[in-house]
Image (spheres, rainbow, N blue to C red):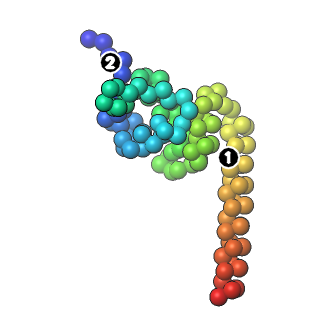
Amino acid sequence: MSEKKYKSISEVSKILNLKKHVIRYWDSKFDGLSVRLNSNKQRFFNNDNIIKLREIKNALYKNGKHNYSLDLANTIANKKNINLHEEKKLVSFSSKNFIYELKLISQNLKRVLKSL
């Protein structure tokens, strides 16, 4: 007996150990997921979709930790042949932006405290 060409979201959820709502969210946010909808608007995934979801999961979560933003994970998942140097540059850029944002928040909080 041959393997099914498409799998339901429940089957994919079990395969990837992800909640169904996470898969639905990623489907709406990530490029390259051409999920098939049936007449009842139920999602069905082919093997390429499952591989893409696995790449996204691996980019977002390594060693059980949340590593990257969704945008960065999308970039990484779309570049199958990304080399380590490029990945480090992307992470470094993301980290610098995060630090900058934290500094701005800190400055704003200090201003608020002074005004109280």
Question: Residue 9 placed where, x, y %?
Answer: 35, 33
Q: Amino acid at mark 1?
A: Val
Question: Residue 3 placed where, x, y %?
Answer: 32, 16
Q: Residue at x 31, y 35 (%)?
A: 10
* Residue at disc 2, secondary structure: loop
Drawn side of residue 86 relative to residue 69, left or right = right
Lower position in the chain sequence, tag 1 or tag 2: 2
Question: Residue 98 placed where, x, y %?
Answer: 67, 57
Drawn side of residue 75 relative to residue 29, left or right = right
Q: Residue at x 61, y 43 (%)?
A: 71
Identify the mark at residue 13; answer none if there is no mark. none
> 25 and 79: which one is in front?
25
Q: Residue at x 72, y 61 (%)?
A: 100
Q: Amino acid at mark 2?
A: Lys
Q: Quadrant location of residue 25?
A: top left
In the image, farthest residue toward the left = 1
* Residue at disc 1, secondary structure: helix
Q: Residue at x 69, y 79 (%)?
A: 110
- Residue 15 visible here: no
- Residue 21 visible here: yes
**Picture quarter with the N terminus:** top left
In the image, farthest residue toward the front = 39
**Considering only vertical position in the picture, is 44 above or below 115?**
above
**Considering only vertical position in the picture, is 10 above or below 103?**
above
Which residue is the site of mark 2?
A: 4
How many other residues sit within 10 Å of disc 1, few (<14), some (14-19) or many (≥20)?
A: some
Which residue is the site of mark 1?
A: 91
How many other residues sit within 10 Å of disc 2, few (<14), some (14-19) or many (≥20)?
A: few
Drawn side of residue 113 relative to residue 65, left or right = right
